[in-house]
Image (spheres, rainbow, N blue to C red):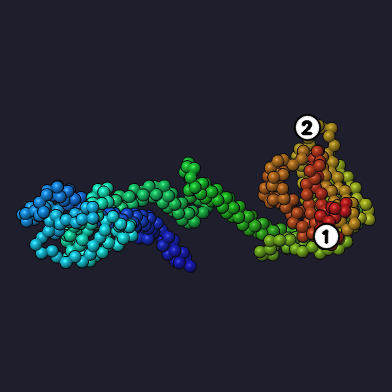
Amino acid sequence: MADTDEKRRGTLRQPGASSLSSKLLWLTILFVMIAEVLIFVPSVANTRVRWLEDRLNTAAAAAVVIEGINELSLPQMIQDDTLMATGTKAIALRKDGMSRMIASVDTLPMVTHQYDLSETTVLQALTDAFDTILFGGDRVIRVYGPVGDNPDMVIDLVLEDQPLRHAMLIYGRNVFFLSVLISIITAGLVFFAINRIMIRPVKRMTDNMQAFSEEPENPGRVILPRQVGDELGVAEGHLADMQTRLQQTLKEQRHLADLGLAVSKINHDMRNILTSAQLMSDRLSMVDDPLVKRFAPKLLRTIDRAVGYSGEVLAYGKAREAQPKRRFINVSALAGEVHDIVAEEFEGGISFVLDVSPDLEIEADSEQMFRVIYNLVRNAAQALATDPGDDAALVRRIAISATRTGSVVQIRVADTGPGLPAQARAHLFKPFKGSARSGGTGLGLAIARELILAHGGSIMLDESVTQGTAFLIELPDQPLPLDTFRARA
């Protein structure tokens, strides 16, 4: 597998002959050549028409001069000179419905094609141009058209098409080489412009992604966005943000993995210590002393909970709490037990108020509900113990109250402490982020929320409190939409 990954990475590092840059260069040359071809075709046809028009104009100038001579025919020597000067075999002038042969060779060759330049369409010009280039060179053609703007005077020529074809081939050759030169220059300019604007930034991002994938935890692998406002600059900014967040996530996952391993090691040894403490507590309960008999049952229950929970934590790969074993439990007794333990831990200065009916019961897992209320009360006690407030006479109080409305029980845990800071509120119920005190982990609230959600209930911060902090728990006896309950209340 490792060899395969190395080969794949090696392939990605080598763009080869089919890189984006080379494709762009060849496509640019191709498109410019296509554009030149589209220009070449009508230009060749136009060259043919202009060449024939030049011959007509030259012959027309000579014909008009000669036509002014009253002699019926010119000497053959003058005719030959005229034909040689115009490159024709015969010149005739039609005027006012009458035709006059201006000059002609002794033996007039047979005409194979004739063209009327006064009625040539674009399509006909294109067809005739390709016909001349492909099949001409040994044909005798007849060409006629008006002299200047006078439609009543028509010049008529007979000539060979070999000089015409030769001129067209020379023009085509020149246009071809010029097109290649223009294509190369244009392609080079377009290539270098696009390569600088697009290809280089894309290659930079590609190389960075490749390097980042090899060392995703190295901060130096995060791309430094260019200070430009185009789409690629925006993409680089998003890529940098994504890489930064990914590094933070990887760091947190590594931290959680290390923390989980450490907790598993500590929990393994702690479980053995708690088992020994459990045995000693069993023997302690046999001591005939009123004070011992008062605290021994509570100590035993506390150690039993610790042993049971340690056993659950040691289950490999267990990421969630066990499903609650629901039964009806007395809320007042549960709150009193939490009070006794927290009061012993935080001696003096904190008063506890239990406003719970003695016969109020909830359908829940007793051990999990103990952990929920214990975490909330202990967090409140820690807040009061670390920050008594500016007013020394201020009463430091924790109140636990509970009421039932139908099948839903509401439990409220409130304190008169300094309240939650803004950062704790922003990351409420998030482990390692939602702690309200320095050095805290925020696990207490995260655990409480997970356990309440497992019961189908909800836990939230009471925003209406102006002094201190209060959490409100809503717990149904059985699955019930809380929106329905709130609509009834």
**Residue 203, image x and y in percent?**
42, 52
Dot placed on the residue nearer the N-terminal end, 1 or 2: 2
User: Of the residues tagged 1 and 2, which is closer to the observer?
Assistant: 1
Judged left or right of residue 351, residue 20 is: left
Residue at image position (12%, 48%) is: 69
Judged left or right of residue 365, residue 223 is: left
Q: CA distance from mark 1 to mark 2?
A: 44 Å
Residue identifier under label 2: 390
Kind of element beneath mark 1: loop
Residue identifier under label 1: 480
In the image, residue 215 sits, relative to residue 6, either above or below, namely: above
**Residue 344, image x and y in percent?**
83, 47
Judged left or right of residue 22, residue 358 is: right
Residue at image position (24%, 48%) is: 148
Residue placed most toward the observer, 479 or 401? 479
Is the residue marked by circle 2 packed among few (<14), some (14-19), or many (20+) residues within 10 Å? Answer: few
Residue placed most toward the observer, 430 or 407? 407
Is the residue marked by circle 1 packed among few (<14), some (14-19), or many (20+) residues within 10 Å? Answer: some
Kind of element beneath mark 2: loop
Residue type highlighted by circle 2: Asp
Residue type highlighted by circle 1: Leu
